[in-house]
Image: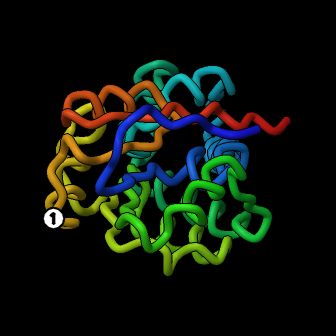
Amino acid sequence: MSLPLPPGEFAAYLFDCDGTIVDSMPLHYLAWQRALDEWGCEFPEDLFYAWGGRPTADIIVALNERHGLAMPVATVVENRERIFQELLPQVAAVPEVVAHIHDAHRRVPFAVVSGSTRATVTASLDALGLLDRFDVLVCAEDYTRAKPDPEAFLLAAEQLGVAPGSCLVFEDTDLGIQAATAAGMASVRVPQQRTR
């Protein structure tokens, strides 16, 4: 199945990572389940996907409020990240997106714009042999306002030296599409890869 692009010429491609380049969302969900298990905290799969693109710490705060828990945010973030790293060898690519990466590589510059940490993004792309394709990585540590705020996409465009209106964004979440639109960028919606 191919992923159609909007009409026009684009000077740069900006990609979300998890669920867009990397079919990692099922592994992220498994990491969440294992990290939350010791606290007896339920995180239904539909809610996990609905909250796609939210920072990890924000999700833990929201789950604490939702369930009347007091999970230590930093501890749960660290455990979830460690478990995800252990699961990474099982990660797969999203073939329709990787086809565009291979097709446009060296024709236009690429950036990853992710809500995940640099360590997670680097490890995920490295596991797929794609890390060297990207000129710029904008990760959770690099900006202060998460998607749907356009800050991260605008930062990537600036680092690539490309006007925002000349960028095409590949995203799998509503928050990401909203952020791209707010940045004045065209976008492609990548269907969520629920591999159950």
Q: Nearer the viewer, residue 32 or 149?
A: 149
**Spot occupied by residue 148 in the image (x, y as percentages of width and height):** 28, 31
Q: Which residue is mark 1?
A: 161
Residue at the location (64% across, 60% down)?
84
Left or right of 49, for residue 71: left
**Spot occupied by residue 177 in the image (x, y as percentages of width and height):** 38, 30
* Above or below 186: residue 117: below
Q: Which type of secondary structure does the marked residue at label 1 adopt?
A: loop
Residue at the location (65% across, 44% down)?
25
Residue at the location (41% across, 62% down)?
117
Q: Quadrant of the C terminus?
A: top right
Classify mark 1: residues with Cα within 10 Å, few (<14), some (14-19) or many (20+). Answer: few
Q: Nearer the viewer, residue 87 or 95?
A: 95
Mark 1: which amino acid? Answer: Gly
Residue at the location (58% across, 54% down)?
100
**Spot occupied by residue 158 in the image (x, y as percentages of width and height):** 14, 60
Q: Which of the 4 image quarters holds residue 102? A: bottom right
**Spot occupied by residue 143 in the image (x, y as percentages of width and height):** 20, 54
Q: Nearer the viewer, residue 48 or 147?
A: 147
The outermost residue toward the right is 196
Does residue 188 appear anywhere in the picture?
yes
* Above or below 59: residue 78: below
The outermost residue toward the bottom is 132
